[in-house]
């Protein structure tokens, strides 16, 4: 989660904020951008409801819009799966824990899905390496 502990073992707020900014910046720099790359819809209408901590559905000129609550980036129609509009970062499972270090030949990979505007992580999946990373995960019916 990017929490940095001080010498006293307590969270260091300033160092944690800086570390989280580094993590978001790295996701945007190293991740695979969404294929649709077009203009994002406005995400400035009234919030209808949240989809987890990061995402929400807001009123838009052309109907409900899904987007990021952190930076206000609109992804697309609320009926779209948010992963279709995400930056995807792939990480080897050995990065997760030392227990996995003997699995360097694993067919399993961690995929992280982040906002294309600010890099905030909103989902992650362990998937087979050859699976389509943008397989729809959810569909909102409004």
Image: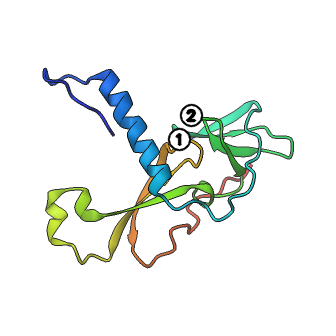
The N terminus: image quadrant = top left
Q: Residues within 10 Å of mark 1 (few under 14, many from 20)?
A: few
Would you place residue 47 above or below residue 40 in this image?
A: above
Q: Which residue is mark 1?
A: 52
Give x and y (percent) for residue 29: 48, 52
Q: Residue extending furthest front?
A: 29
Give x and y (percent) for residue 81: 63, 58
Q: Which residue is mark 2?
A: 70
Give x and y (percent) for residue 37: 68, 59
Calculate the distance from the C-alpha at mark 2 to the C-alpha at mark 1.
Answer: 12 Å
Instruction: Using residue 12 as the reference point, say whether residue 50 is left or right of it.
Output: right
Instruction: Between label 2 and label 1, give the one nearer the viewer.
Output: 2
Would you place residue 128 above or below residue 18 in this image?
A: below
Q: Residue 5 lies in what quarter of the image?
A: top left
Instruction: Using residue 121 as the reference point, say whether residue 59 is left or right of it.
Output: right
Q: Residue 84 lies in what quarter of the image?
A: bottom right
Write the residue at 48% across / 58% down.
31
Write the residue at 35% across / 68% down.
109
Please say if the residues under marks 2 and 1 sit with CB atoms less than 8 Å apart: no
* Nearer-the-camera pick, 124 or 118: 118
Write the residue at 86% across / 46% down.
62
Give x and y (percent) for residue 92: 30, 65
Q: Residues within 10 Å of mark 2 (few under 14, many from 20)?
A: some
């Amino acid at each position: 989660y990017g929490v940095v502990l001080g010498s006293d073992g307590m969270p260091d707020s300033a160092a944690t904020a800086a570390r989280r900014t580094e993590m978001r910046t790295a996701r945007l720099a190293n991740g695979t951008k969404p294929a649709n790359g077009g203009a994002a819809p406005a995400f400035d209408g009234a919030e209808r409801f949240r989809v987890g901590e990061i995402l929400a559905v807001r009123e838009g000129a052309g109907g409900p819009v899904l987007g990021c609550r952190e930076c206000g980036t609109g992804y697309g129609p609320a009926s779209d799966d948010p992963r279709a509009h995400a930056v995807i970062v792939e990480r080897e499972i050995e990065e997760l824990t030392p227990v996995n270090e003997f699995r360097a030949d694993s067919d399993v990979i961690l995929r992280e899905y982040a906002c294309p505007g600010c890099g905030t992580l909103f989902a992650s999946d362990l998937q087979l390496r050859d699976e389509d990373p943008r397989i729809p995960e959810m569909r909102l019916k409004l």
